[in-house]
């Protein structure tokens, strides 16, 4: 969380904090700053979309584990145009009983649970493809590179340019688990994703 916040905001902070400086004061992320300058923005992860790194670009919370509060920040944020990842349960199976997907679709978001048949001309797109983290690679197939291609196609329609954060989230999971096969598989998937971005560039 602190690392993600440093990358997203340029502020060093305390362990566990999302989008805040070490005094618990919310600070703007590069995504929010560029959105205000007219760029389209997006976030992609293979973890929960509410996990530490993607959350650092959109949410503000004192504790990275406050997933339901972080999901509410996503729902309230008007600076992001595209969200792709897992963690659907933090939007639907909530202690407050609110269905954030219904709330977001009523406010102009277009919700999908798969990458199939996405209309990239829609304004706001949210794809939550799992209640939990996405499956590991190769079980999830080419989800991450395909998501990157779709996101670039959508966001590059902006005449002002775009900002897109893509995280190969489960590289970190594999490293925590000291699982070399898992790690190499996830690195291959992320390498394929980088190649798709380079093809566009």
Image (cartoon, rainbow, N blue to C red):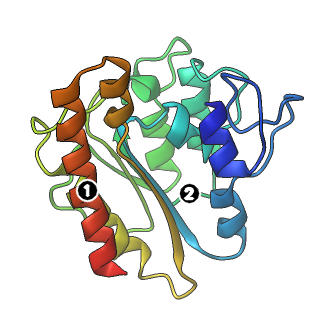
Please, what secondary structure does the residue beneath circle 1 have?
helix
The residue at 70%/27% (across/down) is 17
Local crowd size for mark 2, using a 10 Å CA cut-off: few (<14), some (14–19), many (≥20): many
x, y percent for residue 75: 56, 41
Image coordinates of residue 111 in percent, x first then y, are 34, 49
Determine if residue 149 is in view. no
Closer to the chain start, of discs 1 and 2, is 2
* Residue beneath the point at 48% across and 17% down: 94
Which quarter of the rendered picture does the N terminus lie within? top right
| Residue with the mark numbered 2 | 80
The quadrant in which the C terminus is found is: bottom left
Determine which of the numbered discs, if any, sits on residue 74 in the image: none
Cα separation, mark 1 vs mark 2, equals 25 Å
Label 2's element?
loop
> Any mark on residue 191, and which?
1
- Residue 164 position, x and y percent, is 48, 62
């Amino acid at each position: 969380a602190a690392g993600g916040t440093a990358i997203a905001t340029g502020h060093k902070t305390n362990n566990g904090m999302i989008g805040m400086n070490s005094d618990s004061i919310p600070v703007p992320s590069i995504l929010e700053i560029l959105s205000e300058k007219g760029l389209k923005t997006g976030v992609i992860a293979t973890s929960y979309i509410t996990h530490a790194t993607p959350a650092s670009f959109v949410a503000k919370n004192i504790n990275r584990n406050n997933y339901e509060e972080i999901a509410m920040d996503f729902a309230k944020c008007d600076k992001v145009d595209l969200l792709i990842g897992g963690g659907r349960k933090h939007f639907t199976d909530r202690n407050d009983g609110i269905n954030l997907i219904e709330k977001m679709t009523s406010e102009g978001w277009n919700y999908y649970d798969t990458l199939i048949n996405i209309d990239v001309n829609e304004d706001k797109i949210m794809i939550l493809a799992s209640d939990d983290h996405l499956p590991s690679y190769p079980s999830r197939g080419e989800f991450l590179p395909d998501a990157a291609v779709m996101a670039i196609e959508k966001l590059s329609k902006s005449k002002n340019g775009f900002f897109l954060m893509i995280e190969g989230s489960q590289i970190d999971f594999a490293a925590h688990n000291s699982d070399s096969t898992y790690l190499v598989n996830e690195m291959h998937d992320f390498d394929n994703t980088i190649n798709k971005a380079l093809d566009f560039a």
